[in-house]
Image (cartoon, rainbow, N blue to C red):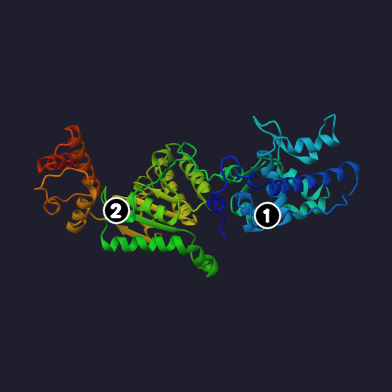
């Protein structure tokens, strides 16, 4: 079962009360953590064992907040819950740990056993692995060692990238700060499902469309292949988990869309996302590719790490810029350029989601990668029937078309892509509006067609 941030969002969770939409459960969780902390602190400082049995609270069925949904769905153990809450609580109560420790050290002083670090701006204690170990096991060496497995990469909270422990050079691993993935922090504390913004740290843009499948005009054979991808999105978890095909199949799905510009590749990716409830991110390759050795791999590693277990669709437009053919090694630059492609082949193949690469020419993609695609789909220049449908769908109903304009003759006479036809429609409609809604004539449309041909060098 994959943990998805989107699955935790509920209509009742708003930006003001996403976490606190059911105060009793939240307060019960915080009380549970507080009592477990105090129990270990009292044992450490006073040598006294707590007599009260502290049980993990359970959410009621009425509580539909993201936090309640998470606990109800994934049934964390008490130990996992303590680890989870230890990392989440500073985002809610900044001085939570400091206030508890102050009860036993009212005049201050060093307390290295508790771990924790100070942030650049955050003035409270931020938990490290040592903090979680203290709350779980106190200072008993054997008991502490028995809890170290909770921090392994194959454990639930780390496997699904909910938590991570920051690496520290030449120091004990548990002294690394425990961090919760930003998207999970947002959904647990605000109820929102945040999406990262295009930046140097995240070189991808969230893309959406208001169009429907009925607006997309593709040949029947191309559309059939697109439906196969839709089937994978809808059923891959059942196939991999319930039917146990994870033993035989690689994770994820890789598709190549190729064909001339303006034939519907980007729109198809957006519609796949829209109709399957997936967010689509178009990768800005100009921000990914770096002239500095190793930086391209670093940029891509960061991108794939953010995308893992999010069910995003990654759309690499003009993919041949980075997934192109490897060259003969003539110098160090060629060597590292080939390493970048090799890294991408490995990384995209291990990605668990849907990756779509778009290119104008199939032959531009490295042949070593071709066999790794689950589907290779050609988007041809529209034929007569597709062009006729595009002309019919593109003009707005209120556009004042001259009676002698027939879409059939336009479809027969001009070989144009969908993007070109939309450009022509926009041009002629704006010309009409600039003349106070004058009739659009065949002459106006032909002028628009000439503009498009000029752009293509025809």
Q: Position of residue 423 (x, y in %)?
A: 23, 42
Q: Are marks 2 and 1 in contact (CB under 8 Å)?
A: no
Residue bearing mark 1:
59
Question: Residue at (39%, 59%) from the top-left corner?
Answer: 373
In this view of the protein, which residue sits in the foreground, 385 or 79? 385
> In the visual, does 220 lie left or right of 276?
left
Up/down of 423 relative to 361, above or below? above
At label 2, counting other C-alpha atoms closer than 10 Å, the crowd grade (few under 14, some 14-19, many 20 or more) is: few
Q: Position of residue 131 (x, y in %)?
A: 74, 43
Mark number, residue 295 = none
Residue bearing mark 2:
215
Circle nearer the N terminus (2, 1): 1
Please identify the quarter of the rendering in which residue 225 is found. Answer: bottom left
Q: Quadrant of the C terminus?
A: top left
Secondary-structure class at tag 2: helix
Q: Residue furthest right?
A: 47
Question: Residue at (65%, 54%) from the top-left corner?
Answer: 71
């Amino acid at each position: 079962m994959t943990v998805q941030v989107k699955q935790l969002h509920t209509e009742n969770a708003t930006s003001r009360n996403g976490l606190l939409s059911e105060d009793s459960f939240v307060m019960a969780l915080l009380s549970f953590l507080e009592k477990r902390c105090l129990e270990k602190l009292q044992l450490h400082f006073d040598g006294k064992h707590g007599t009260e049995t502290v049980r993990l609270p359970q959410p009621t069925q009425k509580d539909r907040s993201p936090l309640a949904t998470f606990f109800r769905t994934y049934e964390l153990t008490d130990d996992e819950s303590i680890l989870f809450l230890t990392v989440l609580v500073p985002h809610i109560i900044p001085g939570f740990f400091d206030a508890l420790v102050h009860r036993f050290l009212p005049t201050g002083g060093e307390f290295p056993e508790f771990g924790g670090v100070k942030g650049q701006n955050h003035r409270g204690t931020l938990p490290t692995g040592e903090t979680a170990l203290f709350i779980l096991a106190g200072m008993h060496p054997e008991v502490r060692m028995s809890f170290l497995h909770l921090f392994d990469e194959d454990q639930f909270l780390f496997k699904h990238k909910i938590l991570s422990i920051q690496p520290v050079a030449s120091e004990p691993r548990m002294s690394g700060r425990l961090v919760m993935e930003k998207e999970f922090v947002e959904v647990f504390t605000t109820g929102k499902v945040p999406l990262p913004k295009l930046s140097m740290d995240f070189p991808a843009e969230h893309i959406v469309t208001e169009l429907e499948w009925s607006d997309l005009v593709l040949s029947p054979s191309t559309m059939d292949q697109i439906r196969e991808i839709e089937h994978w999105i809808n059923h891959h978890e059942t196939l991999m988990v319930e039917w146990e095909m994870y033993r035989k199949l690689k994770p994820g799905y890789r598709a190549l869309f190729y064909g001339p510009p303006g034939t519907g590749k980007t729109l198809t990716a957006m519609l796949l996302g829209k109709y399957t409830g997936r967010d689509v991110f178009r990768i800005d390759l100009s921000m990914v590719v770096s002239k500095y050795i190793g930086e391209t791999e670093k940029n891509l590693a960061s991108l794939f790490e953010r995308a893992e277990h999010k069910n995003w669709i990654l759309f690499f437009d003009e993919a041949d810029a980075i997934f192109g053919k490897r060259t003969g090694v003539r110098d160090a630059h060629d060597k590292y350029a080939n390493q970048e492609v090799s890294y991408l082949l490995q990384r995209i193949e291990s990605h668990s989601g849907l990756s779509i690469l778009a290119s104008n020419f199939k032959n531009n993609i490295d042949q070593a990668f071709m066999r790794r695609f689950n589907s290779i789909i050609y988007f041809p220049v529209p034929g007569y029937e597709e062009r006729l449908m595009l002309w019919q769908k593109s003009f707005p109903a209120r556009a004042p078309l001259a009676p002698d304009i027939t879409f059939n003759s336009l479809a027969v006479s001009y070989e144009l892509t969908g993007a070109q036809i939309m450009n022509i429609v926009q041009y002629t409609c704006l010309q009409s509006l600039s003349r106070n809604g004058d009739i659009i004539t065949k002459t106006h449309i032909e002028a628009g067609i000439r503009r498009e041909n000029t752009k293509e060098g025809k």
